[in-house]
Amino acid sequence: MAIDDVARCLMAMDDDGLRRRVAHGDVDGLDATGLTEEERELLVSAAQDDAETIGFGMQIEAIRPGDPTGPGMQIVPLRPEDTSGDFATSSGLVGALRYARGSGYPGFGHFSQAKLAQGGVW
């Protein structure tokens, strides 16, 4: 698991040109050699998450098991210890931020909070 590498790549994708290339599957500009295929896919999904394609608002919402989800959405408990049945859907940028939330990469905590404050979009 390369959480710090995912965090570094997410911060690099703040560059519009690089993010457009990643959105089309070109991760070469990210120096993503140490990432798993799943982490690369997570970054491509995050790059595709922008205000023009998903609209405004967070991409995390409370749902119940069995509710329909869109393609690429993952259902996860709101908290690991949560047994209430409330779950959250994570996809794209918000999903990638959640994945890398434990990273100690310099500046990632502030970066992540700023992106979430903007509604989870670039």
Image: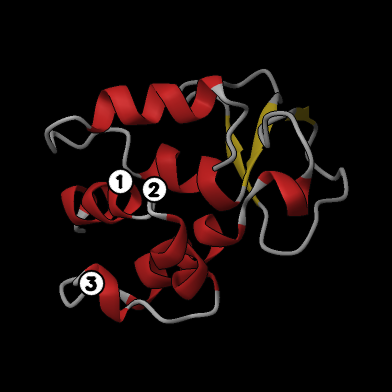
Residue 27 on image: x %, y %: 35, 76
- Judging by the rendered image, the residue that carries numbered circle 1 is 11
Residue 80 in sight from this viewpoint: no
Is residue 15 or residue 96 the one in the foreground? 15
- Judging by the rendered image, the residue that carries numbered circle 2 is 14
Identity of the amino acid at label 3?
Ala
Residue 3 on image: x %, y %: 23, 50
Q: Give the SS element for disc 3.
A: loop
Q: Nearer the viewer, mark 3 or mark 2?
A: 2
Q: Residues within 10 Å of mark 2 (few under 14, many from 20)?
A: some
Quadrant holding the N terminus: bottom left
Residue 116 in sight from this viewpoint: yes
Question: Residue at image x 14%, y 38%?
Answer: 105
Identify the mark at residue 95; answer none if there is no mark: none
Is residue 69 or residue 21 the one in the foreground? 21
Q: Residues within 10 Å of mark 3 (few under 14, many from 20)?
A: some
Q: Give the SS element for disc 1.
A: helix
Identity of the amino acid at label 1?
Met
Q: CA distance from mark 1 to mark 2?
A: 6 Å
Asked where in the image residue 57 lies, by quadrant, the reply is top right
Q: Give the SS element for disc 2.
A: loop
User: CB under 8 Å between callouts 1 and 2?
Assistant: yes
Identity of the amino acid at label 2?
Asp
Question: Residue at image x 49%, y 23%?
Answer: 79
- Judging by the rendered image, the residue that carries numbered circle 3 is 32
Residue 35 on image: x %, y %: 24, 70
Q: Residues within 10 Å of mark 1 (few under 14, many from 20)?
A: some
Q: CA distance from mark 3 to mark 2?
A: 16 Å
Q: Is residue 96 above or below residue 33?
A: above
Mark before the other along the chain sequence, 3 or 2: 2
Q: Is residue 91 left or right of residue 26?
A: right
